[in-house]
Amino acid sequence: MPRTPEQYERLRARRRQEILDAALRVYGARGFHGTEIAEIAREVGIATGLVHHYFKAKEHLFRTLFAETLAQAKTSLDQVFGREAPASEILVDLVGAYLKGAAIAPQYIRFFARAEQDYREIVEPEKVGDFERLLNGLDQALRALIRRGISEGAFIQGDPDLLAAMVRGVIERVTLFVVERAITDERPLARETAARCLALLSLGALPGKETRS
């Protein structure tokens, strides 16, 4: 029995997503220049020519992958930062979201680690600025969150740019630790990391460290 147009479109959408998911995994492991369309096809279990049926060239595939992955990341960040809650609670949510993502989908962490190095070679020149704004969205949102925490009296007075860089450094290092160690239950580590970030913003030092008067 022939497929209906709706079934055909669902099949196309599913196959397209399978190709993008495979490209994400291979790219995270090998980078842009080390990734071949044939390898992506093998990962999916289809002929190389079928990948080209969906994406006319490697650059087209990766531009699509970058755009869609960053859009998903922006949506996730907007959900965390857009919540009506004290700044300290949102920071705890942010840490939890990052580490949960690292535990259940480490390929996305590997993707972003590569993307910061490769995007200028892949993204169309006229869209580099848009890409950089998306890529830097976390920094902007984190600085705004810290400014709000300072105004709420929850965080110490200080340079929001510096404090954001310090907090992001802690989150990113622990996120990579989760990926490298293949940790599947990130919750204890998320609680400890959130506590350390809050201590950093509240006291200017990690727990167990004395502060100078």
Image (cartoon, grey):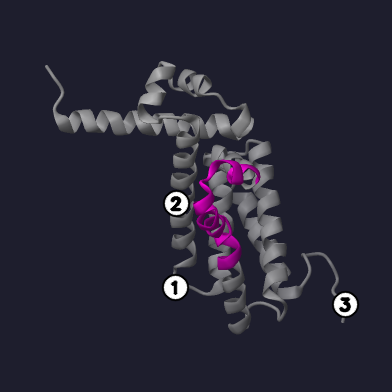
Q: Decide whether residue 137 is among the magenta residues.
A: yes
The x, y position of residue 35, in whole percent, is 58, 27
Residue shown at 81%/64% (left/top)? 208
The x, y position of residue 72, in whole percent, is 44, 50
Q: Residues within 10 Å of mark 3 (few under 14, many from 20)?
A: few
- Occupied quadrant, residue 151: bottom right
Amino acid type at mark 3:
Arg
Query: Residue 27 versus residue 64: which sits nearer the camera?
Result: 64
Magenta stretch prevailing secondary structure: helix
**Above or below, 150 relative to 191:** below
Residue at which label 1 appears: 84
> Which residues lie in the magenta part?
117-141
**Above or below, 141 relative to 188:** below
> Residue most toward the left?
1
Whether tag 3 and tag 2 are in contact, CB under 8 A, the answer is no
Q: Secondary structure at mark 2?
A: helix
Residue shown at 54%/49% (left/top)? 125
Q: Is residue 52 left or right of residue 203?
A: left
Residue at which label 2 appears: 71
Indicate which disc residue 212 carries: 3
- Occupied quadrant, residue 44: top left
Q: Secondary structure at mark 1?
A: loop
Amino acid type at mark 1:
Glu
Residue shown at 44%/73% (left/top)? 84
Amino acid type at mark 2:
Ala
Location of the C terminus by quadrant is bottom right
Q: Is residue 181 visible?
A: yes
Single out the mark in the foreground, 1 or 2: 2
